[in-house]
Image (tube, rainbow, N blue to C red):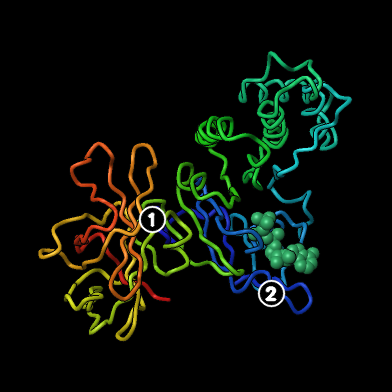
Amino acid sequence: MAEDQTINPAIEIDRVVKRYGSFTALNDVSLTIADNEFFTLLGPSGCGKTTLLRCIAGFEDISEGAIRLYGDDIANDPPNKRPVNTVFQQYALFPHMNVQRNVMFGLQRLGYSEMDARGRAREVLDLVQLLPFADRLPAQLSGGQQQRVALARALAPNPKVLLLDEPLSALDLKLRQAVRLELQQLQQDTGITFIFVTHDQEEALTMSDRIAVISDGRVQQVGPARDIYEEPNNKFVADFIGETNLIDVAVTGVSNGMAACTLPGGAAFTCPAAQGAHQGHGHLSVRPERVSLTAPEKALITGHVQRLIYLGTDMHIDVALSDGEMVKARVQNSQSAHIPAQGAQVGLDFEEGAARLLID
Ligand SMILES: Nc1ncnc2c1ncn2[C@@H]1O[C@H](COP(=O)(O)OP(=O)(O)OP(=O)(O)O)[C@@H](O)[C@H]1O
């Protein structure tokens, strides 16, 4: 889905600033989230993800800007009047109520009759495959099942938008991977717009239609997983999503989205450039799996093997250049003919499309 105004917007975050005293937690954030989208806010701890979610939910006031839900400015709507519901990191269930009662509770507070609340609770419990557990107490469920009760509870009033604040962080890795798939399926089945917060890049890459990468209260880049991974704009995004080499280069010119550079050792190289990249000193991002090892006399860059790390399917190879800079390569162990010995002189090669000149 493209980042533009032609999509049917569920949520428009328009130049939002959030200050706590003199500290700016959100700095001029603008995002348009489409109806029926699985949208993820990704960034390191403290970058402002939860703050943004709390502003959408109405638990925090914004200092500047506007938030619109389906075209309506929601600044004056209290949390319970917004067509939004939240699943928190700590999905506190009532321990003395069974699963069905936990889901019914919020509905009855919204004015549902006992009978309607029961009917709707059973519908959503069926959706998250927990109907057989309706009579159990939370303590009689696994962590993943409790998490699904929390989801059912949040889905029950049929919100237009579901906000999920690191809902998988309490689960172990295997369970997290399974619940990821379930969540994605649930989003598709219900058609509800999901805004999912995580600091886990793998989680973001596997589930989202689009991702906003955030650091220091600012949106760094927005796009589908593949764009963010393969066409990062700046050093932060390239480094935060996956692993990358940031190779020092001299940029002799940029035009039509392509940059002419001089690599360490003096070879000339042309590659795509991020918007805003310019002449001078710069960094090329090249993913380790896109670096191939060849004979030194034919290569773009030369160096010697400093370290080999065996990672099961792959071998991670650190190559030291003559100026001390380190370039990482990743080679499949099944291609063992291409794995050099420690200390060997090697050449490093990568294709034009595997490299990208970034802005700092
Ligand atoms: N009530 C508050 N008063 C002052 N500062 C706050 C308040 N709430 C959050 N902050 C600060 O705002 C920044 C963003 O916090 P936020 O909780 O949004 O981060 P986050 O990206 O969700 O992090 P995490 O992944 O650790 O939950 C942090 O530096 C935090 O200390």
Tag 1, which secondary structure?
helix
Residue 36, image x, y percentages: 51, 44
Which quarter of the figure has residue 312? Answer: top left
Name of the residue lying farthest toward the top? 132
Badge 2 crowding class, 10 Å Cα cut-off, few under 14, some 14 to 19, many 20 or more, is some
**Residue 135, above or below 167:** above
Residue 321, image x, y percentages: 29, 69
Q: Amino acid at mark 1?
A: Tyr
| For residue 67, side relative to residue 320 (left or right) | right
Is residue 211 something one can see in this rendering? yes
Residue depicted at 57% across the width and 61% down the height: 12
> Which of the numbered marks, if any, corresponds to residue 24?
2
Residue position marked by numbered label 1 in the rendering:
229
- Identify which residue, 183 or 7, lies in the foreground: 183
- Identify which residue, 317 or 7, lies in the foreground: 317
- Identify which residue, 47 or 299, lies in the foreground: 299
Residue depicted at 76% across the width and 58% down the height: 77
Name of the residue lying farthest toward the left? 298
- Identify which residue, 345 or 85, lies in the foreground: 345
Name of the residue lying farthest toward the right? 96
Between the residue at mark 2 and the residue at mark 1, the CA separation in whole angstroms equals: 28 Å
